[in-house]
Amino acid sequence: MMSWRAMAAATLLAAAPPALLAGEIRPDARRSGYAFMGPDTRAMQDDDTINPGMLFVLDGEALWAKKTGSADKACADCHGDARSSMKGVAARYPAFDNALGRPVTLDQRINLCRANHQQATQLPYESRDLLALSAFTAHQSRGTPITAGDDPQAKPFVEQGRALYMQREGQLNLACTNCHDDNFDKRLAGAPITQGQPTGYPLYRLEWQTLGSLERRLRSCMTGVRAQAYDYGSPELVALELYLMSRAHGLPMETPAVRP
């Protein structure tokens, strides 16, 4: 059976005549998902004492200082005080890795550091420890303008991500752009449709009742249009994340954001 979300999406898109589809949003008209939230959700994000994502940030702070792996090193042993060393870092990710010859996400960078410098096992995608370290690192960039995709070496991967964003898929034959460029400011099954700007990841989603990565959200959208979701860490998801971050160029980081 088609899920209620899928049915609502199909109804919404069927109601929009092709001639009225808006196309890509002008850079000066791009808005964070925060702008689409109700006052209660905004208040939850704004107050660190009630923002549930901050529990992950605090866990990440403890992990930052914890020695691990056969090298018996902590993140702090190499990077020192994250408040200074990590400021602005997450705003540049996914970033091109010269050794690998491709972009990597912040989660992947954390695992590369664990493997190469701490000689520790890599953390599974969506595990609490990986989300906590990612949230703590990204939190240091809160308020910093996003600059991901500026590296010329990343440009081909940005274009790959853009192509995926524009590509229709699944049994509903929908692309990301159909919702987030053509129909933002509308509602889908009672929830606001945002522009899909990834300014606050990893973020706390009330639907999930936990923190989650941008890759989790992308996979959820793919499942929603009844398409086969890419695996975590796949080149396609990394490229799509890179395009989305480059599309949000100049918007401030909000991690950990709160969304419905």
Image (cartoon, grey):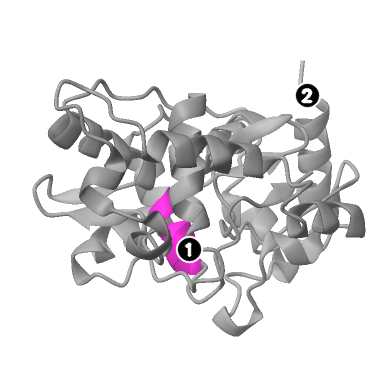
Q: Is residue 211 in the magenta section?
A: no
Question: Which of the two residues, 219 or 6, is positioned nearer the viewer here?
Answer: 219
| Residue 55 found in image quarter | top right
Q: Residue 126, can we see it?
A: no
Specify few, some or many for label 2: CA neighbours under 10 Å numbering under 14, 14-19, or 20 or more.
few
Residue occupied by mark 1: 141
Image location (x, y in percent) of residue 19? 71, 69
Question: What SS does tag 1 mark?
Answer: loop
Q: Residue 27, can we see it?
A: yes
| Residue 211 found in image quarter | top right
Image location (x, y in percent) of residue 216? 54, 34
Image location (x, y in percent) of residue 142? 55, 64
Residue occupied by mark 2: 3
Span of residues in magenta: 241-247
Q: Residue furthest top?
A: 1
- Tell me which numbered mark, 1 or 2, is placed earlier along the sequence: 2
Q: Nearer the viewer, mark 1 or mark 2?
A: 1
State whether residue 240 is above or below residue 110. Answer: below
Q: Amino acid at mark 2?
A: Ser
On-image quarter of the N terminus? top right
Whether tag 1 and tag 2 are in contact, CB under 8 A, the answer is: no
Q: Main secondary structure of the magenta part?
A: helix
Q: Amino acid at mark 1?
A: Ser
**30 sits to left or right of 194:** left
Instruction: Residue at 34%, 54% (x, y): give it.
Output: 94
